Image (cartoon, coloured by chain):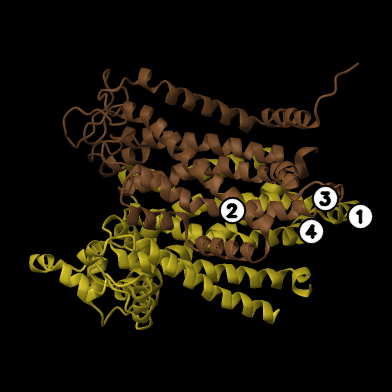
Amino acid sequence: MLAFITRRFLFMFVVVFGVSVLIFSILMTFSPERRAAVYVRSPQQAQNLPQLVESLGLNDPFYIQYFRWVKELTHFNLGYSVVAARPVWDAFKSFLPVTLELNLYSVPIMIIVGIWLGTISGIYHDTYIDHITRIFAIIFWSLPTFLFALILLMIFYGYFEVFSPGIISDAYSVYIHDNPDKYTQYTHLLTIDGILNGRFDIAWDAAKHLFLPVVTQVMVIIALLLRVMRSSMIEETSKDYIMTARAKGADKKTINFKHARKNALIPVVTVAGWLAAFSMSGSIEVEVIFTRQGLGWWLANAAIQLDIPVIMAMCMFMGIIIVTANLAVDILYAYIDPRIRLS
Amino acid sequence: MEKKTHPRLKEFKYTLYRIFRNPSAIIGFTLLIFFTGVAVFAPYIAPPKYAHDPYIMPHKGFSPTPKPPTKEHIFGTTSGQYDIFYGAVWGTRTAFKIGIFVVFFATVIGVSVGVISGYVGGIVDEIIMRIVDIIFAIPTVVLAMAIVVAFGRGLDKVMIALSLVLWRNYVRVMRSGILTLREMDYVQAARVMGVSNIKIMIKHIIPNAIYPVMVMAFMDIGSMVIVAAFMAFLGLGAPRGYADWGQMISLARNYIVGPAEDPLRYWYTIIIPGGCIVLFVLAWNLIGDALRDAFDPKIRRK
């Protein structure tokens, strides 16, 4: 077991290295002049473009440029982001909490509700409850995240005027910025900081801004979990040991929720890697529509404005998150299923 | 005497029977036939104004405020006075182009790489699968965005980028299918009988391993249209004015909230192109769902 984890852990580094080489080579297809243009701040500099290319070493062979990038990476120097008008690492630190806060609420909700709905759908297989959840799942699976977000904004922001886009109201945002002595940013998560500072109005305001983004992300991604859980539950309840338990006259609740669901959960764990990937890309769409300035918003704008260092850094970040999620899945999988652990 | 049908044909008939017994397949195929009709007869439904490129939406004036449906523009006009009806009709062709091109190329690459990986095995298999693992570590949208940024904007670039990302999915499915089937008794039997390896591969393994890939491909046509729509929404796709549902939504983006007295005034600018995307994707997903039920040997004969 330890050997298995060590091997997977080492492999994680291989994948992250591979991701960096892959993205680096994709972005190397830019001409050196275009990559240098990112650093241009004044007309004089634009005239000296060839010298700039030379001084930044953008004409060097691939591996030299790659190793220079890795060397800078070890000093947390990831380049300069034009979109954020700050170094990439600084911008990353300020954008991270926004994305983290969104996923902190949406991921647990979608896991709990997805598994619950999938279980119900699987138990009442082929009844109207199952049909309704299936229709729900397939419709949301066909609904683009950004479109659903726009429709929600249209209804709740436009028509009912209850929720608005953004992270927090301007007045509170100014207050937080101007009063570092009265309002300490412990975690940089607005809802949690608000409560820790005793400012429940700030926490409530932040929660109101979070509501629609969380709903969007949960609804769209829940469909995936629901489907996997449903089919796994159906498969499990048609197995012989469940039949035996039924024949013995065991309590239906015990059979469904104790025997079947526990085993049905095993395949669901494997989609956690997918879940991480979907939450990442879901965050991009949600943040763009609700103008929440987080990592996803940053990446989308970087793609529009050809902010190359940001794309590079974000691909690395997402690669690390997804690979870590997969590693966690492998370990968890072995932990919950003794058949794998002992073989 | 009753004529014996070929077993493959018999199975195929049974598959068709299973598919069309499923109500979701019927809805899916109906929607698909409708969209195919719209795409095929687009020049008759919405006669193009610019002969050189029918995909460019005609527009009268440049006013950014959308105008409600009239007799002339039955779905109204969106920001920039582009005709929504025209965009919806020709956008169907764009959606088919995106979905089918991307999934076709991705399956061709994915299946061939998967077959090589599963058939050759050893170090080749190891290298291919590790490369696939690396590509899997980046979400589809993000990797596609990076490739589009590198290649430059445009609908064709988006399609190439998505095919270059999507093939990874099919490699894994194809390879695992081949590995399972290789150990099956009927394949062993064929081997004992002296059938050549290549013939076993082409006649016995690939035709059976391809079903899960087909189901995935149908579902992916829908999801690729969604991803492409988001990229068009960001402005990474086709140039402004091109009939593309994602772009039509992005044109209307600033009009999701109307004036204070009538906040839902411009609903048609979002709901019409958005509805087209949802129904189009739904069609492929419903068909994919029905195909999965029909092909899955575990529930096929129940």
* CA distance for labels 1 and 3: 46 Å
Residues behind callouts 1 and 3 on a single chain: no
Which residue is labeled 4 in the image?
A: A254
Amino acid, disc 3: Arg
Amino acid, disc 4: Thr
A240 left or right, relative to B158: right
As drawn, the chain in yellow is A
Residue visible at 10% across and 65% down in the picture = A47
Q: Which chain is disc 1 placed on?
A: A
Visible residue check, residue B129: yes
- Compared to A260, does B273 lie above or below? above
Q: Pick the residue in front: B139 or A157.
A: B139
- Compared to B83, does B47 lie above or below? above
Which residue is labeled 1 in the image?
A: A248
Q: Pick the residue in front: A297 or A148.
A: A297
Do labels 1 and 3 touch, CB within 8 Å?
Answer: no
